[in-house]
Each structure stands twice: as structure tokens, then as C-alpha cells.
Image (spheres, rainbow, N blue to C red):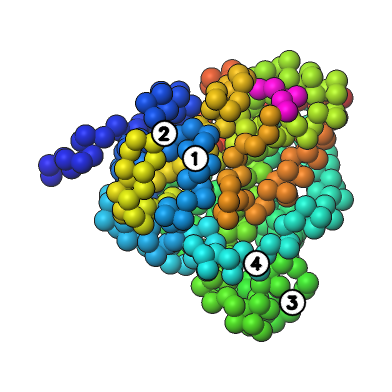
């Protein structure tokens, strides 16, 4: 088969981009805010896909609120079918689990988000503080006083899963199976593994929803089921997809916020010592972790519904667009010394959780979990250190997610 003439003219991203996207972002942004590239070929589902990448704070922030850039699954899925070499692996996943508010435009988005908005307000989330603290200390109690552990596996991953399962009303013990499916779906593995996990998770969620229908228990999922049954505001597919979104997005942002934050603190020991000396810096430190290495490299896939001009470039209708949150958060025109971690940085306004109508619903929960978790780590393990050189750690191969595969640390309990 001859090479696609369009792809042959575009910049081909590779595995090196997955490990260090920041170098390329800085290079691209020197030439303007919009650039056409081809995604790395080994990415599941979207490997080899030609997309426009938007870089820089001002351009990304504006694009996040541009209604001409649609996240609607009914627009994006046909484009995957036309342009992504691996698109045949996508269909079942999209149909069963992806019809949620991240993949919808107004008015559908407005209706879907309204159903769960009240659950994730700062005031509502604050009521979870005692439970989050209890779960945090339970997990840290289970770590050895001395020795090397994978902090992702033993702490950063199970904590937010336990919290979101508690919030949604998932029975104790069932979160173990969910964590396995979640990793397969978001860890950047094979399309086959993701498809198998999608099928198993779909079956589990259908059964869970039916159990909540028979015996509601006052949790978020029971509320969503009641909205479906009493007010007919959610279709069965929307209910399934919304549950999936809350489960996955509800913990994935926190997993990476914790892991990425610990990584940067361990790689920049002075900042760890600064936090040890002044715990009042924790709130600003969490915002700095989100800025320097947020849980997402890019916002959700968008497609142009009409010609959109960004900088000096016209993006044609029907083209895919990725908005680089990571580039925006290291834009030197917005942040001084953007590649340096500074836990006392007061410049706010990072875009780690997005902006506009798709701003991350779970941001208050992720912030609270991170503040509690980092506070506990500082108290319990003040002499914690990386067990390997920072450059030896590998990042997950994902278009959207920015997170480490493992995080081996050497513990020394206080």
C-alpha cells in the first residue's frame, strides 16, 4: 500500500514524544499556536491519526471555549473511522461507554452535567474529608517502615479509586476488579486489552445499575438511576456512560496528580524540604504540581465544525484538534521559569483541569485528595526518596493522559 500523501507531509510524532512532550511543545510553539502532526503509530485506537495540535496559554484557553471545536461523539467517531488506521477497534467502546458529557456539546452537555454538578462542588466534596483522611492513613499504614515500594501501585492508584467507589456506592471489595479494568482502558496498552476490559466493565456496570435500581442507597449512582427512571432525563446508554466517566475520570486525575507531584518533588529535593519546613504551602504546591505536570497532556479530542483560524493557520472543517494543556501550563509568556517547580508560586490560572463548559467536574475532589495525601506523606515519610534516577522512569503511552508507569520510592518512616 502506498503512503498516505497527506500523512507523508506532516510531522510524525514518535515514542520519544510520549516520554518528553515538553521539548516538542516548546519547539512547535516558537512557530505559532497551531501545528499539524501525525500521532505515534503504536498508540491504541488513534495511532497514526493526523491532528492539529494547539499550543500556548492564550490560544489553548481560547480554543477550550470555542463552540466551533466540538467534542460530540456523533461528530468525532465518523472521523476516527475515516482517518485512524486502528479505528476498527474503537466502535464497541464508543457505543457502550463514551456517550457522556465529555463527548457532548450543548444542550446535551448542559443537561448531563446538571445532573451531577451538585455532587462535586467544593462544599459537597469537603464532607468527604474524614473519609479521605481515613483511607489515606489506612493505605500508608500498610506500607513498610523501610524499603522500596511502587508508590503508584500501593498508594496513588488505590486511594482515589477507594474514594470514588465510596462516593458512587460501589460495594466494598468490588473496587479491585474495577481497578484492573480501568488500568487496561487508560494505561495505553493494546487495543485488544482495552476492548476486552470495556466489555467486562460494561457488563459489570449494567449489573451494578440494576442493583441500585432494586435497592437504592442514597449514593451518587442511585441518584443517577432515579433521574433515569423518574424524570427520563438519562437514556440507558447515557446512564451507563456517565457511570463510567465518573468512575474513570473521578480517579484518573488524582492518580496522576499524586504520582507526578511526588516525582517532581523527589527530583527537586529543595522543594520537598521547603514543604517539610512550611506545610501551609500545600495548597499552592498542589496547584504547582498541576501546572508543571498535570494529569492530562491534552484535552478531549475535538473536531472543527467549520473553518477555524488559530494564529495564522486555518484549520479546515472536519479536522481533528488536540489542545495542549501541558504546553499552556509551561508557556513562558504566562509563567516565569515555567519548567521549574516552585511550591510557593502564586501565579494561578493553570489549565490542568481545562476551562469553560468542559472544566473538570472532579477538580475540587482531586485537589482535596491531593492536599490530604501530600500532607500525610510529608508527615509519615519525610525522608522518602526516589529509588531510581529520574530519567529511568517511563511515562504511559497515551494521547491524553500524562502519568508514570511506575514510581519506585525508598521509604524511611518518621
> Residue at label 4?
114
Name the image quarter holding residue 220: bottom right
Q: Give the CA distance from mark 4 to mark 3.
A: 20 Å
Mark 1 is surrounded, within 10 Å at the Cα level, by few (under 14), some (14 to 19) or many (20 or more) other residues, namely many
In front of the other: 107 or 76: 107
Residue located at (30% from left, 33% from top): 12
Residue indicated by mark 1: 60
Give how far apart the Cα atoms at labels 1 and 3 are.
42 Å
Query: From mark 4 to mark 2, how far is it between C-alphas?
Result: 33 Å
Residue 387 location (% of width, % of height): 65, 21
Q: Is residue 70 above or below residue 398?
A: below
Q: Residues within 10 Å of mark 4 (few under 14, many from 20)?
A: few
Distance Cα–Cα, label 1 vs label 2: 8 Å
Q: Secondary structure at mark 1?
A: helix
Task: Find disc 2 in the rendering and name its residue.
Answer: 33
Determine whether the residue tagged by mark 2 lies in a helix, strand or loop.
Answer: loop
Q: Residue at x 51, y 47 (%)?
A: 64
Q: Residues within 10 Å of mark 3 (few under 14, many from 20)?
A: some
Which comes sooner in the sequence, label 4 or label 2? 2
Decide if residue 220 is in sight here. yes
Counting residues from the start of the chain, the first of labels 1 and 3 encountered is 1
Is the residue 333 above or below the residue 105 in the image? above
Q: Nearer the viewer, mark 3 or mark 2?
A: 2
Are the residues tagged 4 and 2 within 8 Å (C-beta)?
no
Amino acid at each position: 500500500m502506498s503512503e498516505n500523501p497527506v500523512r507523508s507531509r506532516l510531522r510524525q510524532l514518535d515514542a520519544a514524544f510520549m516520554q518528553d512532550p515538553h521539548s516538542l511543545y516548546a519547539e512547535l510553539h516558537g512557530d505559532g499556536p497551531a501545528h499539524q502532526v501525525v500521532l505515534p503509530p503504536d498508540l491504541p485506537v488513534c495511532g497514526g491519526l493526523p491532528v492539529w495540535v494547539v499550543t500556548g496559554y492564550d490560544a489553548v484557553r481560547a480554543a477550550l471555549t470555542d463552540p466551533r471545536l466540538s467534542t460530540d461523539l456523533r461528530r468525532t467517531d465518523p472521523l476516527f473511522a475515516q482517518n485512524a488506521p486502528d479505528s476498527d477497534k474503537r466502535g464497541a467502546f464508543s457505543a457502550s461507554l463514551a456517550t457522556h458529557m465529555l463527548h457532548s456539546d450543548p444542550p446535551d452537555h448542559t443537561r448531563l452535567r446538571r445532573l451531577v454538578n451538585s455532587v462535586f462542588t467544593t462544599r459537597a466534596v469537603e464532607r468527604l474529608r474524614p473519609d479521605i483522611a481515613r483511607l489515606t492513613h489506612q493505605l500508608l499504614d500498610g506500607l513498610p517502615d523501610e524499603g522500596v515500594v511502587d508508590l503508584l501501585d500501593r498508594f496513588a492508584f488505590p486511594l482515589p479509586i477507594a474514594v470514588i467507589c465510596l462516593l458512587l456506592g460501589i460495594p466494598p471489595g468490588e473496587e479491585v476488579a474495577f481497578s484492573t479494568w480501568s488500568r487496561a482502558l487508560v494505561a495505553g496498552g493494546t487495543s485488544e486489552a482495552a476492548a476486552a476490559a470495556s466489555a467486562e466493565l460494561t457488563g459489570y456496570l449494567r449489573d451494578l445499575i440494576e442493583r441500585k435500581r432494586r435497592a437504592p442507597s442514597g449514593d451518587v449512582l442511585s441518584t443517577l438511576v432515579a433521574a433515569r427512571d423518574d424524570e427520563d432525563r438519562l437514556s440507558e446508554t447515557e446512564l451507563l456512560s456517565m457511570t463510567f466517566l465518573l468512575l474513570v475520570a473521578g480517579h484518573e486525575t488524582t492518580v496522576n496528580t499524586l504520582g507526578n507531584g511526588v516525582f517532581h518533588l523527589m527530583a527537586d529535593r529543595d522543594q520537598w524540604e521547603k514543604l517539610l519546613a512550611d506545610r501551609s504551602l500545600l495548597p499552592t504546591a498542589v496547584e504547582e504540581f498541576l501546572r508543571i505536570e498535570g494529569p492530562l497532556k491534552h484535552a478531549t479530542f475535538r473536531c472543527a465544525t467549520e473553518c477555524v483560524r488559530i494564529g495564522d493557520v486555518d484549520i479546515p472543517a472536519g479536522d481533528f484538534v488536540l489542545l495542549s494543556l501541558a504546553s499552556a501550563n509551561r508557556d513562558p509568556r504566562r509563567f516565569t521559569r515555567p519548567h521549574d517547580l516552585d511550591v510557593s508560586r502564586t501565579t494561578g490560572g493553570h489549565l490542568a483541569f481545562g476551562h469553560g463548559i468542559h472544566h473538570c467536574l472532579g477538580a475540587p475532589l482531586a485537589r482535596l485528595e491531593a492536599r490530604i495525601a501530600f500532607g500525610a506523606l510529608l508527615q509519615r515519610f519525610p525522608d522518602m526518596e526516589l529509588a531510581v534516577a529520574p530519567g529511568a522512569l517511563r511515562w504511559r503511552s497515551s494521547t491524553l493522559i500524562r502519568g508514570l508507569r511506575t514510581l519506585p520510592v525508598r521509604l524511611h518512616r518518621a
